[in-house]
Each structure stands twice: as C-alpha cells, then as structure tokens.
Amino acid sequence: MTGPQQIAERWPQIQAAFASEGVTISLTQALNVLPKLVSALAGPIPPQPAQPTIDLSTARIVNAPDVRGWPETAKITRVSFDGATTRIEFTKQDGPNRWPDHTPPGWQGPLQYTMWLFLKIEGQWVGSGFIQMWHGRDGSGSPSDPDIPSRYHEHWYYGSRWSPMQGHGPIRSGELIGFMVTAGNARDSVGPVLQERSNVVVFPATDNASFTF
C-alpha cells in the first residue's frame, strides 16, 4: 500500500494507527513518509555495529589464575541486574555437560564456577575472579544487601590484593564493563579449578537491566 490513492482511501485507519501511539500526522506527511517506510522495510538490513570485546591476550589478570590461555568451552547467554542481584547464565551451567563441582579446602560444600569482572583502567582491561558460585545458586546479592555494579567497589574489589581495580572506585552508570565465568574456584587463585572459561562479554554498566548474548 504505497500509492497516493491507496493511502488517501485508507487515511482514517492510518491516522488512527498513528494516534494510538500518540503521534499526530497529516495526510500530506503520510503521503511523503509511508512510501519511504515501506521502501526501507523492503531494502537490505544495514550491518550492525560490532559489539565491544576484550582481547584477553592484552588484558591484565590480578589475584586470580592466568586464564588467558585456557580454552573457551562455554558461552555466556545472559547477564542481568534487578537492583539487588547480579545473575549470569551460560551454556555449561546446567545439564549433562555442565561444569563439575569442586570442593575447595576447608569448605563444607562444592563450588561450580566463579564470576569475573573486567574494568578498563588507564586504557587496559584488568580483571579478576570474584564471586564463588555453587550449582543452583540464583545469583549474588539480595534486597537487604544489594550486589550490583554500583556496589562492586564495596563487595568485589575492595582490597589492595585486587590493585589497580581497588583504586578505580565506584563503577559509573554506562561505563563499559566485562564479565566472564571460569570453572571451579578462581577467587584469590586458591582453586581447585578445571582450566576452562567462557567468552568475555562487554556491556554498559547498570543496576537494572538484562543483556542477552
């Protein structure tokens, strides 16, 4: 329906459709715009801008195993924040091929994987393994004790052993940050670990959003 006569004949319906979305448009504007819209929808899809990435070979790892040479055996599919909890989903989290459980020395129960955070500091990505996760754990944080990007400087990289991350201060809204998971216990390089990791995903920091990959 791109011809002027067709648009004019159906003008009441077209005008009502725009009005339902709070848009006021004249018949003249419709005659100019709608054919262009139809043409745009029928044309080729423009290439999407490349997603930001982290080259692990140039990243700096602090207070954690040097995972840069580990095989990437899992893919992160979602990272989400609801104002209180950080959650992550990845392909080897559940199912028959999931990463196995390992019990660190002194622990009463096993861990499955570790959440990692990367910050860009003076032009270089710096990362470490922070949150130890057991199989079935929903996420990190709660309404009474939120664990979200704006609080990571208090909960994650609060000590000098994560320098220079400690000196970064609070993560700013919209600042690019990176997430990764590794099998086993990577916090403080204690282990045990299965030398496998996920990809690294990069997205703008926020306390309330869900990102799919």
Image (cartoon, rainbow, N blue to C red):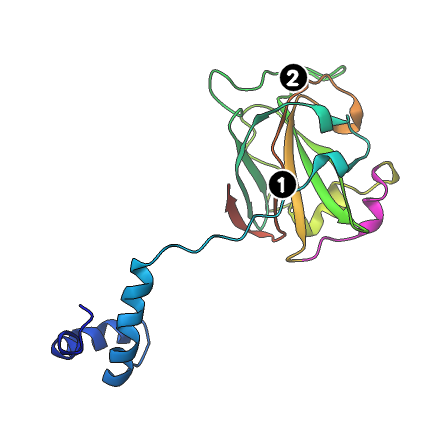
Residue 53 placement (x, y as % from top left): 63, 43
Q: Is residue 12 visible?
A: yes
Which quarter shows the N terminus? bottom left
Label annotation for residue 196: none
Say left or right for 20 vs 188: left
- Residue 79 drawn above or below residue 83: above
- Residue 153 drawn above or below residue 38: above
Q: Main secondary structure of the magenta part?
A: loop
Residue 138 placement (x, y as % from top left): 54, 33
Local SS, label 1: loop
Query: Which residue is painted at 81% across and 44% down in the image?
Result: 165
Local SS, label 2: loop
* First of labels 2, 1 by sequence position: 2
In this rendered view, identify the residue nearer to me: 27 or 136. 27
**16 within the magenta span:** no
Q: Which residue is mark 1?
A: 141
In the image, farthest residue toward the front:
44
Amino acid type of disc 2? Gly
Residue 158 placement (x, y as % from top left): 81, 43
Q: Which residue is mark 2?
A: 109
Q: Which residues are magenta?
A: 162-172
Q: Mark 1: few, some, or many residues within 10 Å (few <14, many ≥20)? A: some
